[in-house]
Structure formats: structure tokens, C-alpha cells
Amino acid sequence: VQTILITEPFILEGTKNYEAGKQYLAVNDQLQPYRLTNFYFGYGGIVDVFRNDSKDWFWSFYQKQMNENGVTGWWGDLGEPENHPADAKHQLRDKGFQRLFGADEIHNLYGHEWTKMLYEKFATHYPKRRLFSLNRAGFAGTQRYGILPWSGDISRSWSGYQAQLPVMLGAAMSGLPYYHSDAGGFAGGDNDAELYVRWLQMAAFSPIFRPHGTALYEADKQAFSYPSEPSLQPAPYNAYAKKVVLQRYQYLPYTYNLSYLHATKAQPLMSPLYHYFENDTTAQRIEDA
């Protein structure tokens, strides 16, 4: 069993981390820390991942957890960034630019720069270890930094499930081989055990097998927080889910082989029919196989 922690690029005001790191945050026009006023848990700021000194400070938290608590992987969340007002400014002087860049100018690059930072720092400090890095945000070229992206906070519904396969196949053909989804769906919908098992079955043949969903019911009775763990599904669906999990483990040698082919020959782990039958017009029109 390995431990993976969730991490986000936001820092809350009134905390020790904010006081220690406020000089590493995005700024306003007066070069003061930009204040996020509509953040989930209060006021705060966002780390400026485009600055080398900010990266060093941000990385120190990752390194501490790995060295002291045995953490082996990271789940980067909200890296679009999800809360990124247009008047927030970033400093790209380490990339040769002297002016401030508005959030809208570099918004799509934020997740890419964050993933790149993790990859490069990890490779420097732990050269004999393999990084596990989940992040739902990236850009062209992010795949070279070992990202394991997923399709975000998707609907817990049959339509949400149906949309995943075309998305994953398209991402695979775009150079993101480990694209996957929150198996079972993330939020909303009904507590449909059959949907959960069907989604799990599809996920067993995905690059990453990872059930995940909201767990907010105690805070919000309208959150429809249903369990995402296979063992917590009602009978007989928990037995069906267990069978899928065991099958996934049986396929691991095959999955490792596909990973090797990707690393050495750029072969996608998941491939649409037209990848194998490129001149077949029927295959070209099929989006979910």
C-alpha cells in the first residue's frame, strides 16, 4: 500500500504557511499578494508557479512529506487553476520577461508548469524512484512530465459514463496515454449500483483504475454523496465490483507491457479502431471503440 496526498496551489490567509509564503504568490498591480475573495474556505492566494523561488518553496512541502511521512505520490487538484481571476498577475522574469502577465495570458499553462515542477524536482532529489503524479490540468507537451490526467468532476450518470470513452481515446491519440476518469462518477445523479459496476468494468481496461466521488454529505445534505469504494456497494454489486478489481490485478503484466510500448515506441495504451485500421472509413466514424 502506497500513500498519495492531495495538494492544491492555494494558500489560506491566517495560516502559518500564508505568512511564510506570501512573497511567493501571484500579485496585484501594486506587487502585493493577490487576494482571492471567493475561495472555498475563506480568503487566500495562489502560488506563482512561474517563479523559480516560488517553485523551491512549494516543493519544500512535497519533499517534507516524502522524507518524513513516507508519501510516495501526489494528486494535484484545481490546477486549471479553478479560481484564477483575470486581474491576478504572475511574474515570468525567470523566463526572460520583465512585465507582469495577467492570469488570462498564462491560465492554460499553469497546470503544465506545476506538473513540470514536480517532475523535475522529483527527478533531481529521487533519481531512482518513479513519480506518481495525478493532475487534471495541463497543456501541449505535459505528457513528457509523467502526468496521469483525468476528466475532472464528471456527472455520476449514464450520460457522464458514456462520454468517457471518446474523451479517453481522443486524449490517448493526442499524446496523453494515461488519461482516465473518476470510475463510478464524481457528483450528482442517483445511487445507481449497476452504473457503478459498469463504470468499474470499463475502468479496468483504462490506463489508470481509480474510483473516486464526492464525500460532502455531512457538510451539504444536497451533495448526494454516495460511496465510491467497491466494498461499500450494496449486495450483490459489491461482489461484482470485487471481481472487477481482481481482474484488474490479473491484467497488470499486460498493462505494464503497454506502458513499455508507449515509453519506447509512443504506442497509446488505449487506441481507437482507426489507429489500427487507418484507411477504414467505418472505423474512422466510430468514436467509442
Image: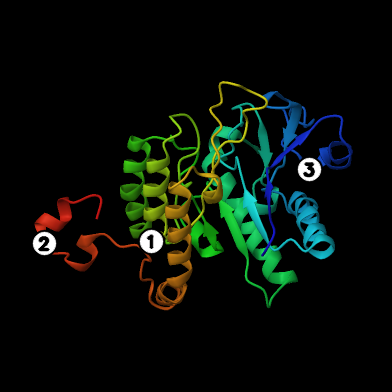
Whether 52 is drawn above or below 271: the answer is: above
Disc 1 secondary structure class: loop
Q: Position of residue 241 (x, y in %)?
A: 45, 53
Q: Residue at x 46, y 33 (%)?
A: 191
Mark 2 or 3, closer to the camera: 2
Whether 76 is drawn above or below 120: the answer is: above
Q: Residue at x 60, y 52 (%)?
A: 113
- Three-letter amino acid code at disc 1? Phe
- Three-letter amino acid code at disc 3? Tyr
Q: Residue at x 45, y 44 (%)?
A: 184
Q: Are marks 1 and 3 in contact (CB under 8 Å)?
A: no
**Mark 3 surroundings: few (<14), some (14-19) or many (≥20) residues within 10 A:** many
Q: Is residue 88 left or right of residue 205?
A: right
Q: Residue at x 43, y 47 (%)?
A: 237
Between residue 197 and residue 67, name the one nearer to us. 197
Badge 3 is on which residue? Answer: 24
- Three-letter amino acid code at disc 2? Asp
Badge 2 is on which residue? Answer: 280
The tag earlier along the polypeptide, 1 or 3, is 3
Mark 2 and mark 1: Cα distance apart in space? 24 Å
Q: Is residue 189 left or right of residue 119?
A: left
Between residue 167 and residue 90, name the one nearer to us. 167
Between residue 287 and residue 84, name the one nearer to us. 287
Badge 1 is on which residue? Answer: 205
Mark 2 or 1, closer to the camera: 1
Q: Position of residue 52 (x, y in %)?
A: 73, 54
Mark 1 and mark 3: Cα distance apart in space? 41 Å
Q: Which image quadrant: the N terminus?
A: bottom right
The tag earlier along the polypeptide, 2 or 3, is 3
Q: Are marks 2 and 1 in contact (CB under 8 Å)?
A: no
Q: Position of residue 67 (x, y in %)?
A: 82, 65
**Mark 2 surroundings: few (<14), some (14-19) or many (≥20) residues within 10 A:** few
